[in-house]
Image (cartoon, helix red, strand yellow):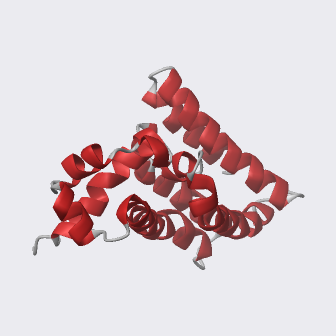
Amino acid sequence: MAQKPPRARAVQAMKQVFAQHGYEGASLTALGKAGGLSKAGLYHHFPGGKADMASQVLVASGKDFTRLVLAPLRSKDPAAERLYAMLDGLNTYYQSGTINCLMNTLALGEGLPAFGPNIKAAISAWLAALTPTLEELGEADGAHAARTLVATVHGALIQTRLFDDPGFFTEMLTTYRRRYR
């Protein structure tokens, strides 16, 4: 298998730095170290500086989110199978709850005006894809149930981190799986 080019490898490695520290807290030193690039290398691959780096990380993460979470919901499979595939995708995307939500951390401070519209669009796409699935599963107000599920996912990520209990996130996913048998 061909090795990813330096920029693509750096983008994947920088994701964790931005997820851990947010936009403001992600230093060029930490980003360069994670990406295996010198300061000159950072600016060679990301001429727009840290904003360019964060944008590229968000784009790459968005592709993963689309593949793992949105695509299953948009499939022609039965509603329960779509939901289960989305839950499995969330487990993969958030590494069983062991990583912070990149969308959340990039929406803090200076990141909100820069990345908020794209993050809002991603969450809106998730809600739009999830709502009809939940309605097919019997929810009278699918939009409310979808917002509740999305909020529960993010709350579980916070509790998983606060209590250092990765099992909590997977338990939450299992609860939703049981709810919609």
Residue farthest along the top direction in this orientation: 163
Q: Quick one: 152 or 3, which is closer to the camera?
A: 3
Residue 11 position within the rendered picture, expressed as x and y whole percent measured from the top left? 30, 62
Asked if residue 2 is positioned above or below residue 98 in the image, the reply reads: below
Expressed as whole percent of the image width and height from the top left, the position of residue 92 reads 41, 52
Q: Is residue 132 left or right of residue 32?
A: right
Label tally:
0
Answer above or below: position of 168 versus 101: above
On the rendered structure, is 58 left or right of 135?
left
Say which of 126 and 77 sits in front. Answer: 126
Q: Is residue 102 visible?
A: yes
Residue furthest toward the bottom?
76
The front one of 42 and 117 is: 42
Depicted 111 relative to depicted 165: above or below: below
Q: Position of residue 29 (x, y in %)?
A: 25, 45
Residue 19 at x, y percent in the picture: 43, 45
Q: Residue at x 60, y 79 (%)?
A: 76
